[in-house]
Image (cartoon, helix red, strand yellow):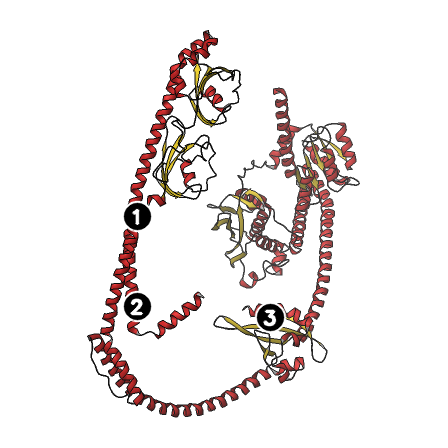
Amino acid sequence: MPNRLQARAGALLRRATLKFKLALFGILLSALGVGALSLYVVKGLRQDFQTLAAKGQSTTALFVARTLDEQLQLRVQALRALAPQVLTLLQSQPAALPAFLADKPVAATIFSRDIYLISRAGLRIAEAPARGFIGTSYADSSYFQQALSSGEPVIQPRMGRFAKQPVLIVALPLKDAAGRVVAVLCGSELLAPGSAFHFAGEVRNGETGGFHVVSLRDKLYVTSTDPKRAMNALPAADEGSVLQRRLQGELGPLLGPDSRGVETLGAAARLKQAEWIVVAYLPTQEVFAPVHALEQRIYGGALLIALLMGGLIWWLVQRELAPLAAATQRIGALAQQGELDAGLPVSGSREIRQLLGNFNHMQARLRAQHQLIRRERDQLELTVAERTAELQTSNAELRRKQRFIHAVTDAMPGMLSYWDADQTCRFANRAYLEWYGRAPEDMLGMPMAELLGPELFARTEPHVQAVLRGERQRFARSMVKADGSEGFAWAEYMPDVVAGQVLGFYAMVTDVTALKQAERRLEELNAELAQRASQAETATHAKSEFLANMSHEIRTPLNGILGMAHLMRRASLPPAQAERLDKILRSGQHLLRLINDILDLSKIEAGQLQLEERDFLLDEAVAAAVDVVGNAIQAKGLRLELQLEGLPNALRGDATRLSQALLNYLGNALKFTETGGITLRGQLLEQGAQDCLLRFEVQDTGIGLRPEQQARLFRAFSQAEQSTARRYGGTGLGLAITQRIAALMGGEVGLRSTPGQGSCFWMTARLALAEHTVPGLLPAEPGVQAEQRLAQRHGGRRVLVVDDDPVNQLVAQGLLQEVGLVVDVAETGLEALTLLASQPYALVLMDMQLPGMDGLQATRALRKLPGCAQLPVLAMTANAFAEDREQCLQAGMDDFISKPVDPERLFATLLQWLDQADGTQRAGRALHSAA
């Protein structure tokens, strides 16, 4: 129904005249203005009246609160006046208390119910007037417990225990001289008519308002104008309600519904004698009753003013729009007569005259535009004819281009197609049609799922979904051709993106069947190659084992040869025999170096040479290389110069291999230099936070090399020329080994040489900086000095040699006995353990390869024997590889001496470990004495 009324009102407004609409709008606007002004005045008047009434309620509540405070104070003072005498009688003549209380009419007048005394035990021991309640227990009464615990007067409203009516209890604790509560004097007053605390039917606030006296402690109405509320608990207060705000301590004027839903205006005041508040309230209907009549007069006057203004607006609009109405009738008459070219008469107010004049001007412009439109229409028809001819020509050219594009795509060896976003084929070249055996009319509009079949489409669909998201796809797949043969294709899907939207994708597929067949053949060849690589690895492993065994088998007899030569050389011999022995020693040392070079090169080529990672001092690594050739350089009359300033000293890497590379350069320079000198210099190329790049150069004043000779260097078993090899000797392995060591250290090698002036061989190495502080080594003991000190300090001490080779046993016994050591020999590990268990030894020289229990097993076993945990055990073995040294150290050996044994190194090593063992024993004895 409301919708129908709105529709009818809308239709009436659309049919209404303009002057009616303007007059209606003016009336509504006037009514709204006057109504808003009236509403504003009424609202202000209501607020002012509310403020005045709120102040009155606050004053009334405060007055009532002060009156009740005075009444409560009067009752407390009355009990205080009786308290001294009651306390005296209680302590001296308890039986006289009832008569004393009955003889106090003032107290009886104030407390309308009775006055009674409760002992500390909670029993009623006196009362006035007599009611027969003597002996009643009040131990569970809250006011008694509160007075007893606080020692202060207590005021509590409650339902009387015996009267069963609302009463007001005033309890005063009586204290003895020590301040201890010995009794409680109580007065009770019935809250009945005549009592100052009885409001029902006696106290009013206006015509319909009243008062509530609320106990905040007990959450109940003490008394109220409404008799139904007196001594009843407060109702549940909603969040933000007037009652809740009062309980939270808000005493000012509040406007809102009370607990019964009646809107009231009230104020509150707090009592001093008790935790009570007095609430004065007045229903808003009574508060604003004087305002309602004034509101009606104001709204009536506003309505009358709005009607008068509406009539005035109606008359003014009708007068002003009269010329416009006449012009409208004139236009209608001219339209019926077909005389649209005639103008309208101009009259009326200035705005109306301007409107009619503009209408006449617009009419003239329309006539001119109509003529222009007719001319443009004729020109448009001519242009359309020309454009149609051009379009036909363009279509013919487009068809020619399409034929050309089809010819190009059909000539492509690969397959090309286009699929829209719905996975429907919109184009396919000849190769695509032939692969699937489809006709062009069947292919266009065919879904991809139908063309590929369920299995192939399931494998292809993830790529299709990805390209439709704009991701280019490349993948290989196998499929069955139209003739039934298996084919392999390489597919590439390219998204067709226009304005950020994927409209479809291009599919380019290349037949890679022949390539796939070649790939399969390549896989077969790779498998065969992998098998051969495995065979080669097995052969390399066998080669490594062979080299290790050959090294051991060569070093063992070589140790006997060189050892016996050393022993014979130490004896007094004729010069000719001594010279022959020196040649034997030099030949044996040369053979030993040759064996070491061949083994190192074999390990490098097999990829088994691994660099150690240990902190070391650079100057000690350089000194190790220089010490080997130093005597030979001096014997040749050459000078040796070291230029190593500015290099970091504490480094981390393989110091042994670095010394070996420098020794190869120094040995090479020594071999080809007859006069002048040799210079070893170092240079810091790069310095990082964790590592550095060093360059070492060995420059000599030797014979030099021609460019074609330089090109053949750094190759294994290669020298500058054969004549050089015959004159100077050597195998050509040293430079090749140096090159490979430099590569393992992340560096390079090279040389500069001028024939007749000398050569400069250089290498670079990237070494890490030391992670910890590297302690410097003690100065090496010269061979003769070490031998002498060993004989002086440790002559007569017993050592054990464990070796199964008789010749090596004789060599070891001979060398050790030369320095005064007592030598025992064991051929097996078990025999060595038996000797160690039977007597103490200062040191053990242990071979690795022994019959039965080898040297590693024997070392692990002897460490468990009593007194052998700190016994120096030195490996003396022909197993000279780095991994052999590592195995010995892991088994519990302390040091490693490779065969053939160098007597000087042997004596220095024995001196070091025997001195260290003496120091450990002395420290142990000192610790034992201190304990």
- Secondary structure at numbered mark 3: helix
- Which label sits on residue 783? none
Residue at image coords 67%, 51%: 599
Question: Residue 85 location in percent, x, y?
Answer: 41, 11
Q: Tag on residue 464?
A: 3
Q: Which mark identifies residue 24?
A: 2
**Mark 2 falls on what kind of element?**
helix
> Mark 1 to mark 3: distance in Å?
81 Å
Residue drawn 41% across and 39% down? Answer: 245
* Residue carrying label 1: 291
Q: Is residue 631 visible?
A: no
Q: Quadrant of residue 891?
A: top right
What's the amino acid at mark 3?
Val
Q: Nearer the viewer, residue 27 or 728?
A: 27
Q: What's the residue type where badge 2 is placed?
A: Leu
Nearest-to-viewer mark from 2 and 1? 1
Q: Relative to residue 481, is residue 176 drawn left or right?
A: left
Residue 258 against residue 601 in the figure, above or below? above
Tally the numbered discs. Answer: 3
